[in-house]
Amino acid sequence: MADVIKIKKGIDIRLAGEAAKVYAPASQAKLIGFNPDHFHGMVPKPAVKVGEPVKIGTVLFYDKNNPDLKVVSPVSGTLQAVNRGERRKILSIVVENDFKATQETVAAIDTSSADALKASLSNAGFLPFFKQRPYDVVVNPSDTPRAIFVSTFDKAPLAPDMEFILKDEMSDFQAGIDVLSKLAPVYVGIEAGSKLFSHIKNATVTAFSGSYPMSNVGVQINHIAPINKGETVWTITPQELVFVGRFANKGKLDFTKTVAFAGPFAANAAYYKVTVGTPVSAICAANISNGVKARVIAGNVLSGEKTDCDSYLNPFVSLVSVIAEGDETHEMLGWIMPRFDKYSVSGSFLSGLVPWLRKHKTFDFDTRILGGARHSIMSGEYDKVFPMDIYPEFLIKAIIAGDIDKMEALGIYEVVPEDFAAAEFVCSSKMELQKIVREGLDAMRKEMC
């Protein structure tokens, strides 16, 4: 039986509109695209010219600094466009799908050595789906990680149920674990009480109980085996791990994944099977309630990114959230009015004074900040929802000050922006903590690498 770690700090935000546990049909996408910015840390260089044919597994672009870091096509067809912006920055690379699913010939995974295994993962196009800590960037193929971490659940608002998604994929999930265990020790975080993931082999399985953000892999790393200076660990999400397992089991590249579409204004909140790089329109077209000025978010409402139906889906996300913009909402007396239908952390509304409401009632959120930004940090706010052995307030101050030594001493190597999503939510000064942490990580990487 897995060890259980109880996380006492955190916050559960019950947002209305959770996806029903059913699969809805998604339209087959004619155009499949990648935004290289989603692979943070890569300097992309196209490997195919516009008009040239591609197969599943054909390299679309690679990292100029690490040519072994390759992003491959998930479909066969023709390279339709390489869209560029200012200073010829690549904004997206688009493939026109011919729906024939023709595959490149890719050698089977070689687990005879760490270098051979990394070469196999590189040739199959799997390496860009791994992220490394410190710095929260795509992995460096020349590094061998101290460990690899996988979190099999998500407690963020409207997060998809990974047990529902992977219940028929467990043989491939286990195969992926078996492959990665030849490279480094694998640690799998599961939710306490999980039966589906509790019998994983060739990995150290640890159960967690508590509130968000306990499901964040960074929180799990901090409680299982914290990162020290000079060490590198890799992380990968469960569905991307299944890509590796499918290839190990079947010898074919299959980049199909499940994405939940959810939110208070999702007309058909359900699960959809799509190919990596599918346009968001494949699942959100006609699935947003009429008459609502909605915001579409790739990911959860706390750490996702604003997108639109014409964009290509971030390959790392398993959720598309839809909430109201709220910019046309006018409420009499604002926060002074005693309300039971508004979420409150501090007790500004009656719902915050009645614990039962906050734990069991679902709430309709919109994108309004509901307050003004202030250049101050309220003591003790972040600590209540930040379950890591780090002083979040002092780390944020060190990042703002640009103090590299203090950032290092206060644990910046262990964190990524999403670890501060809950703290950003409760911040009464409305500070963009995730943006601050991202800038701090980039500054550290530029200074140290």
Image (tube, rainbow, N blue to C red):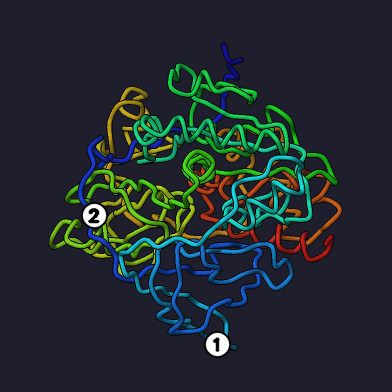
Residue that badge 2 annotates: 26
Q: Is residue 443 above or below residue 7?
A: below
**Of pointers 2 and 1, the one earlier in the residue sequence:** 2
Estimate the spatial distance between the alpha carbons at disc 2 and disc 1, rounded to whole Å: 34 Å
Location of residue 316 in the rendering, given as x and y in whole percent from the top left corner: 49, 53
Please provide percent x and percent y for residue 286: 16, 61
Q: Which three-letter amino acid code belongs to the residue tagged 2?
A: Ala
- Tell me where residue 28 appears, x and y as whole percent: 26, 61
Left or right for 3, reference 194 = right
Give the residue number, with chain letter if any, for mark 1. Answer: 86
Q: Secondary structure at mark 1?
A: helix
Q: Are marks 2 and 1 in contact (CB under 8 Å)?
A: no
Report the quarter where the N terminus lies: top right
Q: Is residue 433 visible?
A: no
Residue at point 33% right, 60% down?
296
Packing grade of label 2 (10 A; few <14, some 14-19, many >=20) is: some
Tell me, yes or no, if residue 25 can be seen here: yes
Q: Quadrant of residue 186?
A: top right
Q: Residue at x 61, y 64 (%)?
A: 70
In which quadrant of the rendered view does residue 146 lie?
top right
Q: What type is the residue that disc 1 sits on?
A: Glu
Residue 343, above or below 174: below
